[in-house]
Amino acid sequence: MIKTGLYYVGGFLLLYGLLEVILELVLLFNFYSEWLPADRQFFSQWLFEADSGKAYWADKRGDLGRGITNLATGLIMLGIHRLISNQEEQSKKSEVATLRKDLGNWPPSV
């Protein structure tokens, strides 16, 4: 039950975070493309020095940060799912090996 939850919630967060980051980058580049070609050299100056540019950049950083956080959380959850799956596989292999070893001594010599 926990493995299934980790798998589906982690996959959802991974996809959602990836789509959120892509969307925010597309919106940022779309905003950049609305500037006239002669004024594009002042875009970075506007972005980091003007009050409206600072507010816009702070909003984009927040949105990108949330997307990256969702992406990282999804990756961590999928990694934990993978670790649990590998541990279960190894425990199954060790159980089979010990059963064969125990059965190899049958019948006991008298």
Image: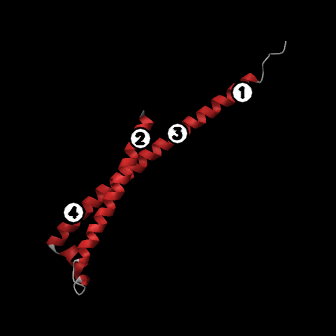
Residue 6 - label: 2
Numbered circle sitting on residue 59? 4
- In this view, 105 is above or below 94: above
Residue 52 image position (x, y, % from top left): 15, 71
Give me the residue at 17% from left, 67% from top.
Answer: 55
Q: Which residue lies furthest to the right in this view?
A: 110
Give how far apart the Cα atoms at labels 3 and 2 are: 11 Å
Q: What element carries label 2?
A: helix
Considering the numbered disc 4 on the image, is that residue within a helix, a strand or a loop? Answer: helix
CA gap, disc 1 and disc 2? 34 Å
Which comes sooner in the sequence, label 4 or label 1? Answer: 4
Task: Looking at the picture, tell me which residue is in the foreground, 26 or 57.
Answer: 26
Neighbor class of circle 2 (other Cα within 10 Å; few <14, some 14-19, many 20+) is some
Point out the tag, 2 or 4, that comes first from the N-terminus: 2
- Residue 4: percent from left, percent from top: 43, 37
Q: Name the residue type under label 4.
A: Asp
Residue 53 place in picture, x, y as percent: 18, 72
